[in-house]
Amino acid sequence: MMKRFTPLAAALAFGLAPLAAPAAPPEETRNCFASGTSWQGWNAAESGDVLYLRMQGGTIYRVDLTPGSHVRKWPGHFLVNEVRGSSWICSALDLDLTLADHSGFREALIAVSLRKLTPEEAAAIPGEARP
């Protein structure tokens, strides 16, 4: 008696079955925020290669920029994030940051990492860098 293999049976036999899509992380572990509605303030670390973003409720995110960015928060300077697609920011790839002022100055900033700080890490931010 000869066994017949269907394409699915053959794929299963050779370990080629399609993988199930990974489940979305539980809501409490997601480190996303809505651009524009959650973002309340920002500041730069002394090195100028790190930004701190303050969200509604006091949550603070750390954004590491490409080395040599040397960002400073001066009066009249503001941080702009260009939203392309979804307004949810979940990783550094979702940020399209520009430092700008009212006279037309614009400097593109490249975010290389983004992470939500723990309350202890946020409390440890030096006062002059606190957003």
Image (tube, rainbow, N blue to C red):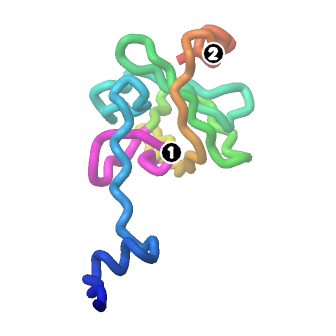
Left or right of residue 109, residue 20 in this image = left
* Part of the protein shown in magenta: 80-96
| Residue at image coords 36%, 30% | 26
Indicate yes or no whether the magenta region holds residue 95.
yes
Determine the secondary structure under disc 2: helix
Determine the secondary structure under disc 1: helix
Q: Position of residue 43 (x, y in %)?
A: 56, 24
Evaluate whether residue 58 shows in this view: yes
* Farthest bottom residue in view: 2
Q: Where is residue 48 in the image (x, y as percent from the top left)?
A: 68, 34
Q: In this view, does 32 lie above or below 38?
A: below
The quadrant in which the N terminus is found is bottom left
* Farthest front residue in view: 1
> What's the mark number on residue 92?
1
Mark positioned earlier in the residue sequence (1 or 2): 1
29 and 119: which is toward the camera:
29
Q: In this view, does 99 lie above or below 16?
A: above
Q: Name the residue under label 2.
A: 121
Q: Is residue 48 above or below residue 38?
A: below
| Residue at image coords 67%, 11% | 124
> What's under tag 2, amino acid-wise?
Glu
| Residue at image coords 35%, 16% | 56
Indicate yes or no whether the magenta region holds residue 111.
no
Left or right of residue 38, residue 121 in this image = right
